[in-house]
Image: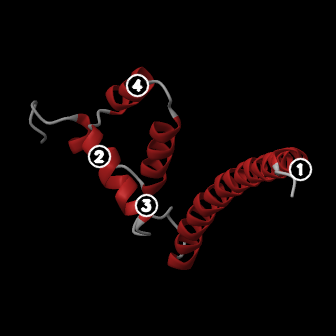
């Protein structure tokens, strides 16, 4: 029999599906109050979510019936999504840099044209 001081999470057995669902729900909550509500509702602590997230990301937590290759695929898909987001951010930064370089090039050509027009007037006659 469980002691009165133990939390519901310590007395309750969560399936892998439960754990994955709660980690996803916790991670998708943008409001700290919603995260706290989930923890209170399920009788959890932040450490439970952290431990399950680490296990999920390492491929050690998979839904019942999922084969390890399927879990590995899920981890690879998450990594692919993360890398794709990085590529998109870097592409946007590169586009911005190209635009700045284009402006700098135009300004340089304009300054050269102005300099070329002023140069004959500043030369001394021979």
The residue lying at 44 percent from left, 69 percent from top is 59
Mark 2 and mark 1 residues within 8 Å of each other at the beta carbon: no
Q: Quadrant of residue 65?
A: bottom right
**Residue 47 at least partly seen:** yes
Q: Alpha carbon of mark 3 to alpha carbon of mark 1: how far?
A: 73 Å
Q: Which circle's residue, 2 or 4, is located before the other in the chain?
A: 4
Q: Mark 3 = which residue?
A: 56
Residue count near mark 2 (Cα–Cα under 10 Å), binned few <14, some 14–19, many ≥20 = some
Using a 10 Å C-alpha cutoff, classify the residue at mark 3 as few (fewer than 14 neighbours), some (14 to 19) or many (20 or more): many
Label 3 and label 4: CA atoms lie apart by: 22 Å
CB within 8 Å, label 3 to label 1? no
Residue 13 is at least partly visible in this image: no
Left or right placement of residue 57 versus residue 111 in this view: left
Q: Of the residues tagged 2 and 4, which is closer to the observer?
A: 4
* Residue on which disc 4 sits: 32
Could you tell me which residue is drawn at 29 percent across and 39 percent down? 46
Indicate the secondary structure of the residue bearing disc 2.
helix
Relative image position of residue 52 (x, y in whole percent): 36, 54
* Residue situated in front as seen by the camera: 28 or 48: 28
Q: Residues within 10 Å of mark 4 (few under 14, many from 20)?
A: few
Residue at (78% x, 51% y) in the render = 108
Q: Earlier in the sequence, mark 3 or mark 4?
A: 4
Would you place residue 29 above or below residue 107 in this image? above
First along the sequence among labels 3 and 1? 3
Residue at the spot of label 1 = 120
Query: Local crowd at mark 1 within 10 Å, few (<14), some, or many (≥20)?
Result: few
Closer to the observer: label 2 or label 1?
Answer: 1
Most distant residue in the front direction: 126
Q: Earlier in the sequence, mark 3 or mark 2?
A: 2
**Which image quarter: residue 85?**
bottom right
Residue closest to the eye, 67 or 120: 120
């Amino acid at each position: 029999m469980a002691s009165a001081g133990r939390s519901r999470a310590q007395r309750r057995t969560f399936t892998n599906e439960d754990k994955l669902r709660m980690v996803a729900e916790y991670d998708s909550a943008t409001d700290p109050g919603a995260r706290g509500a989930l923890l209170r509702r399920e009788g959890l602590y932040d450490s439970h979510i952290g431990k399950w997230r680490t296990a999920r990301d390492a491929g050690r937590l998979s839904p019942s019936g999922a084969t390890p290759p399927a879990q590995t695929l899920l981890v690879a898909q998450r990594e692919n999504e993360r890398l794709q987001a990085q590529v998109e951010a870097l592409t946007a930064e590169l586009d911005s840099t190209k635009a700045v370089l284009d402006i700098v090039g135009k300004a340089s050509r304009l300054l050269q044209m102005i300099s070329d027009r002023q140069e004959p007037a500043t030369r001394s006659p021979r």
